[in-house]
Structures are given as C-alpha cells and as structure tokens.
Amino acid sequence: MSPRSEDLDQFGRFTEPALLILISLAERPRHGYAITQDIEQVTGHRPGPGTLYGAIARLESRGFIKPAKSEGNRSTYELTAPGLKALRARLRAMETVTRLGQQRLAGA
C-alpha cells in the first residue's frame, strides 16, 4: 500500500484528529491519555474520548498505527512505516495549500 495524503481524508470528520494523533505518535509511542494531553498542548483543544478512540481505531485498521508495549493497563500506540508515509504526504499537501494561501493573501 502506498499512502497518499488523500488516505487521511477518508476518515471524514476524523481527519483532523487522525492527523493530530499521527503527529503526536511521530515523536514517540503514547497511550490514549498522553495523546490527548499532547494534542491539547499543541492545539489548545482536548479531543473527547469518542473522537480520540474512534480515530485511533480507524488509524489502526488502516495500519497507520499499531499497539506498542503497554504501560500497565493502558494501551500504548506507535506509528508504523505506512503511517509515517501518510503523515509526510499529508503534511506536504498542507504545505502546498498554505504556500498558495499565503501568496494569494499577499496579493489581496
């Protein structure tokens, strides 16, 4: 499977949480609560448990993340190689859109 930036678009309303989860796991494996804390620190918003674990389940089903060594009774997740490729592709696509937006704003 060759991940493209569109692969994350298929998560629908979970696209942004899925992206933020991948970004969080790019730093190191984390359990759900640690992912929530990281996302809140970065964005100022705390995803609800349904949103977080729904996105985690979708990412895991696509092979973008996988369970890692657990910390006690908490499930810990880590980024997989396909997840890393999908994250890089999505961030490149976002860079392109950002550049275009900045160019158009400069001319406004």
Image (spheres, grey):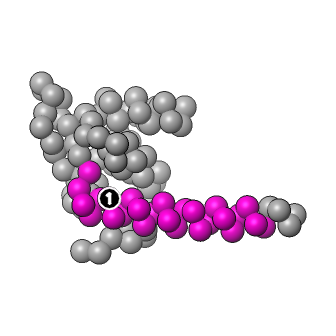
Q: For this view, does 16 lie left or right of residue 61?
A: right
Can residue 8 be found in the magenta stretch?
Answer: no
- Residue shown at the point (48%, 30%) measured from the top left: 41
Q: Residue furthest front?
A: 27
The residue shown at (28%, 54%) is 59
Where's residue 28, x and y in %?
29, 40
List the single residue furthest toward the bottom. Answer: 2
Q: Is residue 39 above or below residue 3?
A: above
Residue 55: in sight, yes or no? yes
Find residue 11 and report its image quarter.
Answer: bottom left
On screen, residue 53 above or below 83: above
Q: Quadrant location of residue 37?
A: top left
Q: Which residues are magenta?
A: 79-104
Quarter of the image containing the C terminus?
bottom right
Query: What's the amino acid at mark 1?
Result: Leu
Task: List x then y, in percent, for residue 8.
Answer: 40, 62
From the viewer's perspective, is 36 left or right of 62? Answer: right
What type of secondary structure mainly makes up the magenta span? Answer: helix
53 versus 61 height, above or below:
above
Q: Estimate how packed mark 1 is, as few (under 14), some (14 to 19) or many (20 or more) residues with alpha carbons within 10 Å.
A: some
In the structure shown, which secondary structural element does the residue marked by tag 1 occupy?
A: helix
Residue drawn at x 83%, y 62% as measured from the top left: 106
Which residue in the protein does label 1 denote?
A: 84
Quarter assignment of residue 96 = bottom right
Foreground pick, 5 / 62: 5
Residue 102's x, y, as percent?
A: 73, 61
Which residue is rendered at x = 26% and y = 51% of the image?
A: 79
Q: Is residue 45 visible?
A: no
Across and down, in percent, residue 3 comes to 33, 70
Magenta highlight on residue 91:
yes
106 left or right, relative to 53: right
